[in-house]
Image (cartoon, rainbow, N blue to C red):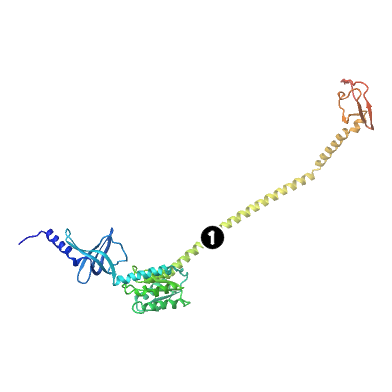
Amino acid sequence: MRTYSVFQLSSYIKNVIDSEELLKNIVISGEVTNFKITGRNAYFTLKDNQAQISCIFFEYIPKFLIREGDKINCKGSPSYYVKGGKLSFIATQIEPCGEGEEFLRLLQLKNKLQAEGLFDRKISMPKSIKKIGVITSSEGAAVYDIISVAKRRDKNVNIAVYPVKVQGIGAETEIAKAIKELDEYDEIDCILVTRGGGSYEDLSAFNTEEVARSAAACKKYIVSAVGHEIDYTLCDFAADLRMPTPSAAAEVLTKNTQEVKNKIHNDIKYLSKYLNELFDSYSSKLKYSIFNLGSAAEKKLYSGRDKILSKANRLQNISFFNDKANDLNQSISRLQANDPKKILSLGYAKVYKDGKSVNSIKQIIKGDNINMLFADGKTLANILETPQKYEINKADKII
């Protein structure tokens, strides 16, 4: 019996597969598992109920989102890897089928609504929420979770449940109608559209254009909490707020009354402390101002008193006036003694030349005309001789 090496057998298998024209550029269909992208290549497994095969897509360029469990049509050719002893399917093209096609349609619808600006219309959460309108199934666990969380946090909040179908035929119409009717109900402060988790098909009602447009057109604050944390729907994008779970939505829409009480208590303590400090500060400033005002007034009063006492003392001391009278008499005597008329009456004369006073013999010469002023009149005189200097001896006395 002839013996073959592993390499010979593997090579033969590869040659058989590569030479079979019927296996080239074929399309296989299956469910995606273990999808991952490494570098520029995509690696995944296609399986059905009876078998599975490893796939490789070289130079992969994504055209749509591929998730675990999606069904796809994969075009390519099988190839046997000799060294690894493994059969793989080399993909050259991927197209969605089944749920994949639905997801592609959903993506196209999302892009359409986003281009219209439908997801940009947002309003702010009300500061006070007393009544929440909940749109969900009356039989699901979500409504009980919401009521439990809301009442635990705020016993005064009211929950109004609007029961609707959340999946199946006609569910999207009921949800859209519920949004419109609660939007017109004045006592409702905000609206919560919610349901528990489920498959892609279970959440399909919340991925319809009808529900998305109703949520975007809602004038009241609207929150969407559909499925699990990883699930996103068109209703989530159209709402004012998306929450990952119904319980989380109930948390954000209610206030913890104990936290509010604690905050008020702390605010009161802070305000009381602030007012006390403010009072003490202004009280100190007022006392300081009163002290300064009294000190200044007292100083001014004492200064005025001293001036009055000084003047009173001077009035009481008559010698002050006598001294002033003596000083006045002496001044009068000096003025009288220096009276020019009195001096001229002693036989003296005042001499003027050319309107100027002559105080020295050097100021006149022979032939000058001079004016002479006496005590009782004046006369004009002519100098006939050259004036000579007169020496006054110590023995001479002028009277």
Q: Which of 279/313 is in front?
A: 279
Tell me residue 138's x, y (percent).
37, 79
Q: How many marks?
A: 1
Q: Is residue 313 left or right of residue 283?
A: right
Q: Is residue 105 visible?
A: yes
- Residue 158 to residue 386: above or below: below
Tell me residue 316's x, y (percent).
79, 45
At 84% from the left edge and 38% from the top edge, which residue is drawn?
Answer: 328
At 62% from the left edge and 54% from the top edge, which residue is drawn?
Answer: 289
Q: Is residue 16 left or right of residue 115?
A: left
At 77% from the left edge and 46% from the top edge, which residue is drawn?
Answer: 311
- Residue 121 to residue 362: above or below: below
Quadrant of the rendering where the N terminus is positioned: bottom left
Secondary structure at badge 1 equals: helix
Q: Quadrant of residue 373?
A: top right
Tell me residue 133's x, y (percent).
42, 76
Q: Quadrant of residue 27?
A: bottom left
Read off the residue under disc 1. Answer: 276
Say what amino acid the circle numbered 1 marks.
Asn
Q: Is residue 251 visible?
A: no
At 51% from the left edge and 62% from the top edge, which residue is drawn?
Answer: 271
Quadrant of the rendering where the C terminus is positioned: top right
